[in-house]
Image (cartoon, rainbow, N blue to C red):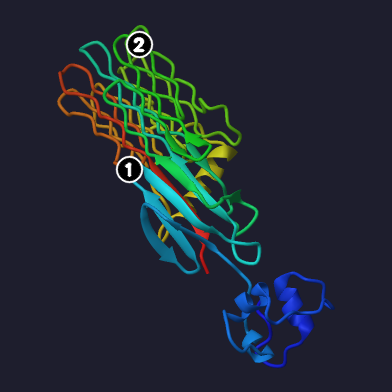
Amino acid sequence: MPTPTGQIGLSDVNAELGNPPTQQINMDSAPVRGLAEVPSGAISMSDLQGKSNAQFVTATGGTITTDGDFKFHTFNSSGTFTVTNAGNPDGSTTVTYWVIGGGGGGGSADPNHTGGGGGSGGVRFNHPQPATGGFPVSVTSYPIGVGGGGAISASGTPSTFSSLTGSGGGAGGDSFPGASPGGCGGGGRGYPNNPRTGAPGNSGSFSPPEGFPGRSGRPSPRGGGGGGGIGSGGPVNQENREGGEGTSNTGNAALQSARTITAPSPLTGGGGGSGGGADALQPAFDGGGYGGAPFLGAGSGTANSGSGGGGAGGSGPLPAGSGGSGKVVIRYKFQ
């Protein structure tokens, strides 16, 4: 904490400098001058009143916004996070991060089957968000990779920050291959005699998990399964082809709460795409693409949400939706 603004003693100065309380002070030393903000010339104890030795993380890169005492660096495309001051324990030394991979594309369809929804990209995060004791940074440049969303029936690509990776979301199942695993798994195809199961999530085997499985398809009326997502479990309708948000459990709640990293409002995204339907348009959640129907094309995942694309509906040539691209957000205390 800062030195007193009124009467000040040597113990106050030593406390701010991290010295023993009775240590003698050389007023001309670099630490004392730095604290007093008097680089040269005459210096007195009054120059040390109300001063703090705190240093804070300083960095460049991405789109920078502020909220109170915190700065946010948002990367919607690949770039570099460059730390120019790593701070100290009296200020800040660590960052909070949100890294979400690109969402998987929805599965295609033919007259006999419907496509599964693409899975959301996996999310890596630290929460709550301390000024110190979190993810440490040093004075260096950190490459940022923002994963692309998967095309139709293709998985998304990972997003990266330092040693952290949010895996790409798995593709929704289509007419031949099954759904693909990923950060969140793709939903299984719908087929009268042979519906497929949803694919597993958390392909990076992280704890807490980066994402969850896709839902399975249904045989009648050929509902494709929703892709897995990071949110708390969405409602399950009778045909099991809603916008899949994964199986509800305590891990989902942790991922949901981590969205509060983003100022001034919580981060949105991380929803799985809806499975394709044989008879009706199906909605999705948290940026996921809506599922297609016979005469309605499927929706794509929202850009920079990491959300999955919707699966295609049957009985028509209309396409499935592609996955949404990923995002990286970094937060730290700057004052």
Secondary structure under badge 1? loop
Q: Nearer the viewer, residue 65 or 117?
A: 65
Dot 2 amino acid type = Pro
Residue 221 position in % (x across, y down): 30, 18
Q: Earlier in the sequence, mark 2 or mark 1?
A: 1
Q: Is residue 322 above or below residue 194?
A: below
Occupied quadrant, residue 303 = top left
Dot 1 amino acid type = Ser
Are circles 2 and 1 on residues that touch, CB within 8 Å?
no
Residue 169 position in % (x across, y down): 40, 29
Residue 160 position in % (x across, y down): 45, 37
Residue 117 position in % (x across, y down): 34, 26
Q: Residue at x 74, y 69 (%)?
A: 18
Query: Would you name the residue on which mark 2 appears?
Result: 177
Q: What residue occupies the far right of the structure in this picture?
A: 22
Q: What residue occupies the far front of the structure in this picture?
A: 41
Q: What residue occupies the far top of the structure in this picture?
A: 193
Q: Is residue 295 above or below residue 102?
A: above
Query: Residue 77 has which mark?
Result: 1
Label 1, residues with CA under 10 Å away: few <14, some 14-19, many ≥20: some
* Relative horizontal placement of residue 94, taking residue 21 as reference (left or right): left
Q: Nearer the viewer, residue 258 or 32?
A: 32
Q: Nearer the viewer, mark 2 or mark 1?
A: 1
Q: Is residue 101 above or below residue 316?
A: below
Q: Residue at x 61, y 70 (%)?
A: 54
> Which image quarter is the N terminus in?
bottom right
Secondary structure under badge 2? loop
Q: Residue at x 24, y 25 (%)?
A: 320
Label 2, residues with CA under 10 Å away: few <14, some 14-19, many ≥20: some
* Relative horizontal placement of residue 282, taking residue 204 as reference (left or right): left
* Relative horizontal placement of residue 202, taking residue 307 as reference (left or right): right
